Image (cartoon, grey):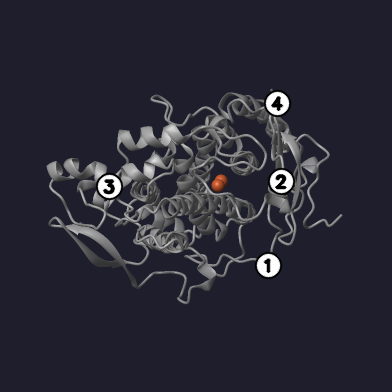
Amino acid sequence: MNELFDVDYDGLIPNNVALNSDERVKRALEKWHPGYISWWHDMGPQGFQESLVYLRTAVSVDPKGWAKFDYVRMPEYRWGILLAPQVQERQVNFGAHKGEKAWQEVPGEYRAMLRRLIVIQGDTEPASVEQQRHLGKTAPSLYDMRNLFQVNVEEGRHLWAMVYLLHKYFGADGRDEADQLLQRRSGDADTPRMLGAFNEKTPDWLSFFMFTYFTDRDGKMQLEALAQSGFDPLSRTTRFMLTEEAHHMFVGETGVGRIVERTAQAMKEAGIEDPHDIAAVRKLGVIDLPTIQKKMNLHFSLTLDLFGNEISTNAANAYHAGMKGRFREERIKDDHKLESGTYPVLRLVDGKIVSEDVAALSGLNMRLRDDYVADAAIGVGRWNQGIAKYGIEFELKLPHVAFHRHIGEFSRTNADVDGNILPPAEWTKRRTEMLPSSADRDFIESLMQPESTPGQFAGWIAPPKTGIDNKPGDFEYVKIAT
Ligand SMILES: [Fe+2]
Ligand SMILES: [Fe+2]
């Protein structure tokens, strides 16, 4: 057994944090456990709780090999507490405390700030499980169904990761927050989840793939920023979450890519050259490219809202305190204090979008959002290669950051996908050119017929290039209990 990496599976809660020698936290988590399981039964994947799913479980935190694959019933999944190995002599790498020893306990002055950061991150994890709970019934293949459930159980584990920090480091308030994480519900009128995008519906599989591509990628950016934290337990927790998160974005990128490819291929086979001949394309039983663009506009814009206000005192304070850094802080060449210097921020001034230099510390949300947009553009480029391969002239494009916003500078205006400000009436008139209409949603829904024969795929999505865990094409990823 490698002490640094291996996970103890003996008790109720698998962990590599020596829970056995921490009686107080162990008891607190064991008390929280039944509530979690009952939440999973109530709000986890609908209809497949008895099915055997070919899932990976973390058995180590060694980056070179940490997962074991096997058939599991989801309620029996071993949700555990896994921290990346401690880095000896780690220091606070940015902010006012730069160069001091990283904190192993919560610094009193930053307690409220830190708790808030952990609760907000924690709240997103169960939210997405709730949003996706009905998708199993319309899965386009067993392969996709398995990927959905893998993402779901890992979001459940991410909730455990945050709840561990709350119980371990925040006493009675932490316990209350951990309980409330099981009480809020995505989209609930009275007790919604904390952030807007996590209260939206994920009505179909194209939405699911867009969500895992765009919204899980916000998760990646937030986790990257928290992985920099001078509060070492938060850094270690989020570093391991990032290794799991990579698969979620793989599911999103390849999912959208396979839909796009299938559409382009079907068009080519039918000799349809005009991607805007929507009726003709839909007759082929595939999703037309303009509708895919509209779904992308929706999910991208909802996700941008998660980055908060462009100019933010909270973000400045969290950075100054050494609690939340920048994306890949260690690779940035500056003083890592940001007491001087500026950052260009897009603002709405006299009805126009202009770039203004603001104090670098105030513009941190904008900076993280810029890093996000650059990261999100990479996969879009790959989707476009999939279209070009079939000689179809159509390019998917990220909409302008001012488009369809509800938080920040641009929530006060109506911009189109190119960033032109429109009068409200004009925007309303053109809305369904830019965002899915109810007819678009109905069409997509009509395609959502389940395909559960091993190796078979619904007609609107191409098969993946390779299987999970190198399994052959007809592998039975889910043994559906009847
Ligand atoms: Fe997550
Ligand atoms: Fe995720």
Which label lies toward us, 4 or 2? 4
Q: Secondary structure at mark 4?
A: loop
Graded by Cα atoms within 10 Å as few (under 14), some (14 to 19) or many (20 or more), the crowding at tag 2 reads: some
Reading the image, the residue beneath label 4 is 481
Instruction: Give the answer, above or below, for where 394 lies relative to 306.
Output: below
Reading the image, the residue beneath label 3 is 434
Which circle's residue, 3 or 1, is located before the other in the chain?
1
Q: Going by the image, does 179 lie left or right of 213? A: right
Reading the image, the residue beneath label 1 is 89
Which circle's residue, 3 or 2, is located before the other in the chain?
2
Which circle's residue, 2 or 1, is located before the other in the chain?
2
Residue beneath the point at 50% across and 67% down: 94
The kind of residue on which mark 1 rests is Glu
* Quadrant for the N terminus in the image: bottom right
Mark 3 and 1 residues: CB-CB less than 8 Å, in contact? no
Reading the image, the residue beneath label 2 is 56
Q: Going by the image, does 142 lie left or right of 286? A: right
Graded by Cα atoms within 10 Å as few (under 14), some (14 to 19) or many (20 or more), the crowding at tag 4 reads: few
Quote the CA–CA distance across marks 3 and 2.
38 Å
In the depicted view, which residue is nearer to us: 210 or 2? 210
The kind of residue on which mark 4 rests is Ala
Mark 4 beta carbon near ligand 2 (under 8 Å): no
Q: Where residue 395 sits in the image (x, y, percent)? A: 36, 60
Q: Secondary structure at mark 3?
A: helix
Which label lies toward us, 2 or 1? 2
Residue beneath the point at 58% across and 24% down: 42
Quote the CA–CA distance across marks 4 and 2.
20 Å
The kind of residue on which mark 3 rests is Met
The kind of residue on which mark 2 rests is Arg
Instruction: Give the answer, above or below, for where 35 lies relative to 465.
Output: above
